[in-house]
Image (cartoon, rainbow, N blue to C red):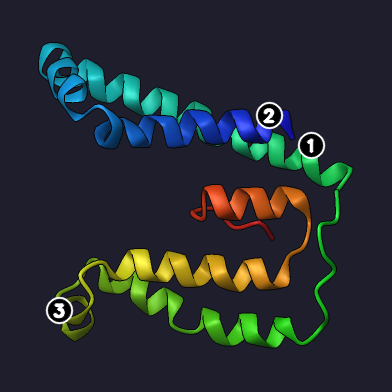
Amino acid sequence: MVYLVLGLVLFLGMHSISIVAPAWRDRTAGRLGNAWRGIYSLVTIAGVVVIVWGYGIARQNPVVVYTPPTWPRNVTAVLMLPVFPLLLAAYFPGRIKGSLQHPMLVGVMLWSLAHLIATGTLASVVKIICDPSFDTR
């Protein structure tokens, strides 16, 4: 579980720099140029690798937070139906993109909610709540 949390800190930490310290990020990116993109990419990729590795380790000895009944699997399936059209709508002009400012974000949020309903291990819950961009199945 430690590696999962460490990976999430790396990944989300890099993605939060523009929120927490936008002036520092702009100065550093301006000073380093493309090297900043390289550093950002390497730390982000390292975070993803540690997340996957830590999640794999955490799944070997799962801590069950709750045991979902069988019916949420059907709810999960229904909630997943609009996810892929929403993800695609982010890249193509149309009514969906016009009515939702961020259709990909809505899709990822639906995906997270659906998988949180159907998954009850501590590693899955931590991963979904902290970083809903990776599938846990």
Residue 96 at x, y percent in the picture:
23, 82
Q: Residue at x 64, y 39 (%)?
A: 52
Residue position marked by numbered label 3 in the rendering: 98
Which residue of the protein is positioned furthest toward the left in this rendering?
Answer: 30
Q: Residue at x 59, y 73 (%)?
A: 114
Which residue of the protein is positioned furthest toward the top in this rendering?
Answer: 31
Q: Residue at x 54, y 47 (%)?
A: 130
Vertically, is 90 above or below 17?
Answer: below
Nearest to N terminus: mark 2 or mark 3: 2
Q: Alpha-carbon distance for marks 2 and 1?
A: 8 Å
Amino acid type of disc 3? Gly
* Label 3 Cα neighbours within 10 Å, binned few <14 / some 14-19 / many ≥20: few
Vertically, is 38 above or below 129?
Answer: above
Residue position marked by numbered label 2 in the rendering: 3
SS at mark 3? helix
Q: Quadrant of the C terminus?
A: bottom right
Amino acid type of disc 1? Ile
Residue 53 at x, y percent in the picture:
68, 34
Q: Which mark is residue 57?
A: 1
